[in-house]
Image (spheres, grey):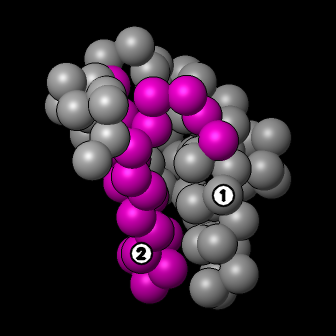
């Protein structure tokens, strides 16, 4: 089990229109998995939705920034 159990109590859902395949999903999982405080990332290719479980110290902006650096914009 993770040491940061208390830090994984928030969920952020985003839509990334550029998601078109499983490779995109893998890239997103890797990029967001490198963000400190992120505990889980799920990507639904069909709906272009990204669900991120994370601690309170992780802001939506930091998640959006990590996606942007990976080449995926977030729909507002």
50 sits to left or right of 36: left
In the image, is residue 37 part of the stretch drawn in magenta?
yes
Closer to the camera in the image, 52 or 72? 52
60 sits to left or right of 11: right
54 sits to left or right of 21: left
| x and y, in percent, of residue 7 in the image | 28, 24
Q: Rate crowding at label 1 as few (under 14), some (14 to 19) or many (20 or more) other CA atoms within 10 Å.
A: few
Closer to the camera in the image, 26 or 73? 26
Closer to the camera in the image, 17 or 49? 49
| x and y, in percent, of residue 76 in the image | 48, 40
- In the image, farthest residue toward the top: 57
In the image, is residue 26 part of the stretch drawn in magenta?
no
Q: Residue at x 64, y 86 (%)?
A: 21
Q: CA distance from mark 2 to mark 1?
A: 15 Å
| x and y, in percent, of residue 42 in the image | 40, 64
Query: Which element type, helix, strand or loop, lies under badge 1?
Result: helix
Cβ atoms at labels 2 and 1 below 8 Å apart: no
Camera sees residue 13: no
Q: Which residue is mark 1?
A: 30
| x and y, in percent, of residue 19 in the image | 62, 72
Specify the label residue 19 is tagged with: none
70 sits to left or right of 57: right
Q: Residue at x 44, y 21 (%)?
A: 58
Q: Which residue is mark 2?
A: 44
User: Which range is magenta?
Assistant: 34-55
């Amino acid at each position: 089990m993770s040491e940061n159990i208390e830090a994984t109590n928030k969920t952020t859902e985003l839509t990334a229109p550029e998601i078109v395949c499983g490779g995109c999903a893998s890239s997103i999982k890797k990029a967001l998995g490198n963000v400190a405080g992120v505990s889980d990332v799920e990507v639904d290719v069909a709906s272009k939705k990204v669900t991120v479980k994370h601690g309170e110290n992780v802001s939506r902006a930091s998640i959006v920034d990590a996606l942007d650096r990976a080449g995926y914009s977030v729909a507002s």
